[in-house]
């Protein structure tokens, strides 16, 4: 029972203040998990529509989307905060309604009942559950 490289609480939030004067292209960050592809797509569309154009990167942290390298006007940054709250209610694997759960390696993941069971059953092979989530996504346009 050795936690494999689990992040500890010294990893502080990385959302930086917006820098509105820096010319940057539209954000094209990839979703870190299959269930949040739609959430990241909203952020990508909003980044492209912002004036000036905004950009961001994201990852999973404690069962929700965590944004970093955020650049853009204040309304865009506020949208990202709202989307972070949204991600905390959607399954990381399939996007269904979900709640945060502590998994076997003492990490927090947001999972629907079906995938909470799948992750628990998979144990150290949990990444295969995510792989199946990616495989079940509709083809990208
Ligand atoms: Zn699910």
Image (cartoon, grey):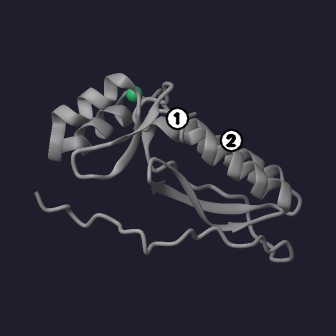
Quarter of the view holding residue 22: bottom right
Q: Which residue is mark 2?
A: 42
> In the rendered image of this protein, does residue 55 appear above or below residue 126?
below
- The residues tagged by marks 2 and 1 sit, at their Cα atoms, a distance apart of 15 Å
Quarter of the view holding residue 38: top right
Q: Which residue is mark 1?
A: 140
Viewer-closest of 26 and 114: 114
Left or right side of 43 for 104: left
| Residue 56 point in image, percent of width and height | 65, 62
Which label belongs to residue 114?
none
| Residue 72 point in image, percent of width and height | 79, 64
Left or right side of 12 for 104: left
Q: Are marks 2 and 1 in contact (CB under 8 Å)?
A: no
Left or right side of 40 for 80: right
Dot in front, 2 or 1: 2
Viewer-closest of 96 and 108: 108
* Ligand 1 in which quarter: top left
Quarter of the view holding residue 15: bottom right
């Amino acid at each position: 029972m050795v936690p494999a490289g689990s992040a500890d609480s010294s990893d502080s939030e990385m959302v930086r203040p917006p820098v509105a004067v820096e010319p940057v292209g539209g954000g094209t960050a990839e979703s870190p998990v299959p269930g949040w592809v739609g959430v990241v797509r909203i952020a990508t569309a909003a980044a492209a529509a912002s004036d000036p154009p905004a950009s961001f990167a994201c990852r999973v942290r404690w069962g929700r989307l965590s944004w970093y390298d955020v650049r853009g006007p204040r309304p865009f940054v506020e949208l990202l905060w709202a989307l972070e709250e949204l991600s905390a209610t959607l399954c990381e694997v399939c996007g269904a309604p979900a709640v945060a759960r502590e998994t076997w390696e003492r990490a927090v993941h947001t999972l629907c009942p079906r995938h909470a069971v799948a992750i628990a059953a998979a144990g150290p092979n949990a990444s295969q559950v995510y792989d199946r989530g990616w495989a079940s996504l509709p083809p990208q346009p």
